[in-house]
Structures are given as C-alpha cells and as structure tokens.
Image (cartoon, rainbow, N blue to C red):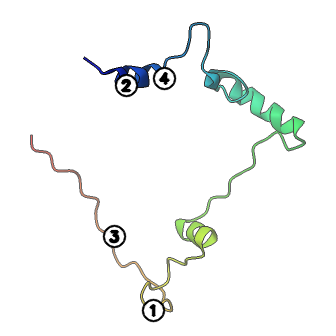
Amino acid sequence: MPSTADRRRFLLHVIPQGFMRVRHFGFLANRAKKHALPQCRKLLGLNPALPEIPKKSPQDLMLELTGIDISRCPKCKKGTMVIVAELPKVRPWDSS
C-alpha cells in the first residue's frame, strides 16, 4: 500500500476537473503552431518566414561556441590533427 506521501506526490500531477493542461492551448499548441508562429513573428515586426539555419561542420560550431579548435593537437595546440582512420561502430552484444 502506498504511503500518504507517495499518494500526495502522485496527486500533485492530477489536475482538477474542468481544467486543461496549458501546453494544449495557445500559439505553441501542436495544432496551431504551423499557422500561429508566422503570425506572431509578423506582429513582432519580424519576417514571418523562419530564418534559414546555416549548416556548419561540428568543428566550426565548436570553435564558434567555445573558442576551442578541435582540429588542433590537444597536447601542443600547434599542429593540425589529421584523422587517419575511424573506428567502426560496435553493435551491442546480443546474447540470444
């Protein structure tokens, strides 16, 4: 039998009769998102079309976000690291 504390903790997640979870309403609701987000952007004076996200390599993103150049040697920080081979991905062992 669950303790009183366990029942109380569970009931904190139950909403009262007649209430609806907020995530199902508004401009971020899944049904309205496609049409409402461009309208919100227009009302804010922004271009209604979502901006194009430039495709960057992981090395460029790491350098931009952290300032760390991962193509440099991690030990001396001067030489350029060259990938000579990649290890194959290992599948999890299956005992069947």
Q: Which quarter of the image is occupied by the N terminus?
A: top left
Q: Residue at x 82, y 38 (%)?
A: 41
The residue that label 4 is drawn on is: 12
Camera-nearest label, 3 or 1: 1
Q: Classify residue 66 as left or right of residue 95.
A: right
Camera-nearest label, 3 or 4: 4
The CA distance from mark 2 to mark 3 is 52 Å
The CA distance from mark 1 to mark 2 is 56 Å
Query: Residue 37's mark?
Result: none
Q: Amino acid at mark 1?
A: Cys
Up-down: is 74 above or below 4? Answer: below
The CA distance from mark 3 to mark 4 is 49 Å
Q: Nearer the viewer, residue 40 or 15?
A: 15
Q: Amino acid at mark 2?
A: Ala
Q: Nearer the viewer, residue 21 or 80?
A: 21
Q: Position of residue 32 (x, y in %)?
A: 70, 24
Q: Position of residue 16 (x, y in %)?
A: 56, 12
Q: Secondary structure at mark 2?
A: helix
The residue that label 1 is drawn on is: 76
Circles 4 and 1: CB distance less than 8 Å? no
The CA distance from mark 3 to mark 1 is 22 Å
In the rendered image, which quarter is residue 7 located in? top left
The CA distance from mark 4 to mark 1 is 55 Å
Q: Amino acid at mark 3?
A: Glu
Q: Classify residue 15 as left or right of residue 2.
A: right
Circles 1 and 2: CB distance less than 8 Å? no
In the rendered image, which quarter is residue 56 located in? bottom right
Q: Amino acid at mark 4?
A: Leu
The residue that label 2 is drawn on is: 5
The residue that label 3 is drawn on is: 86
Earlier in the chain: of badge 3 and badge 4, it is: 4
Earlier in the chain: of badge 3 and badge 1, it is: 1
